[in-house]
Image (cartoon, rainbow, N blue to C red):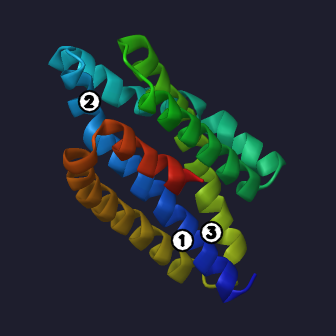
Amino acid sequence: MSRRGLYLHVLTTFLFFCAMNAVAAIVIRYTRDLGYSRELANLVWSGTFLASMIIRIPAGIFADRTSPFISMALGAAFAALGTVMQIFSTSFTLLITSRIVQGIGTAFFISASIAGTYYVANARLGEALGMRAAAIALGALVGNSIIGPILDSLGYRVAFSLPFVLFL
């Protein structure tokens, strides 16, 4: 694949991790603002990782049997769906379910993203993986940095809407 394909892959990875980190930065605060305890807020936050851990191997098999790029798109769709659920969430049940849906999305995206890097690397796998890793770090930095001021200025609905747009 061309350099353009590699750059598109890195951009997609950046946007996914920017969105996931933006959500992670505000979901505990949102849970607490809904009146739930610290323990339940932490459970909501960890729901993504629990679901992702359980689904990762089947998601990797799916990526092998189809295409890593199909799996990445499916992962982004699940993550976006979880964010829509958060936009309208007012209960603990919907909030934890939204994080589980995002965890399924993460499982489908991450393994496939690594496999996709192999396909777009053109025999420069080390460089491509380095670019992917830098995109993840930059996504974490940007997602965490921009979401707080957006939340403080415009509220939770807008703050959760931004990651939704990034997942698309």
Q: What amino acid does circle 1 point to?
A: Leu
Q: Residue at x 60, y 48 (%)?
A: 76
Q: What amino acid does circle 2 point to?
A: Tyr
Residue identified by numbered label 2: 30
Q: Is residue 146 left or right of residue 94?
A: left
Q: Residue furthest right?
A: 65
- Measured in 3D between alpha carbons, the distance from the residue under mark 1 to the one under mark 2, in whole angstroms, is 28 Å
Q: Residue at x 24, y 19 (%)?
A: 34
Dot 2 crowding, Cα within 10 Å, few <14, some 14–19, many 20+: some
Q: Residue at x 31, y 21 (%)?
A: 43
Q: Is residue 161 visible?
A: yes
Residue identified by numbered label 3: 117
Q: In front: 129, or 101?
A: 101
Q: Position of residue 148 (x, y in %)?
A: 22, 50
Q: What amino acid does circle 3 point to?
A: Thr
Q: How many marks?
A: 3
Q: Position of residue 102 (x, y in %)?
A: 51, 35
Q: Position of residue 5 (x, y in %)?
A: 69, 79
Q: Is residue 12 left or right of residue 94?
A: right
Residues at marks 2 and 3 touching, judged by CB atoms closer than 8 Å: no
Given this view, does label 1 or label 3 mark the residue nearer the observer?
A: 1
Q: Mark number for residue 84? A: none
Q: In front: 130, or 98?
A: 98
Residue identified by numbered label 1: 11
**Comes first in the chain, label 2 or label 3:** 2
**Comes first in the chain, label 1 or label 2:** 1
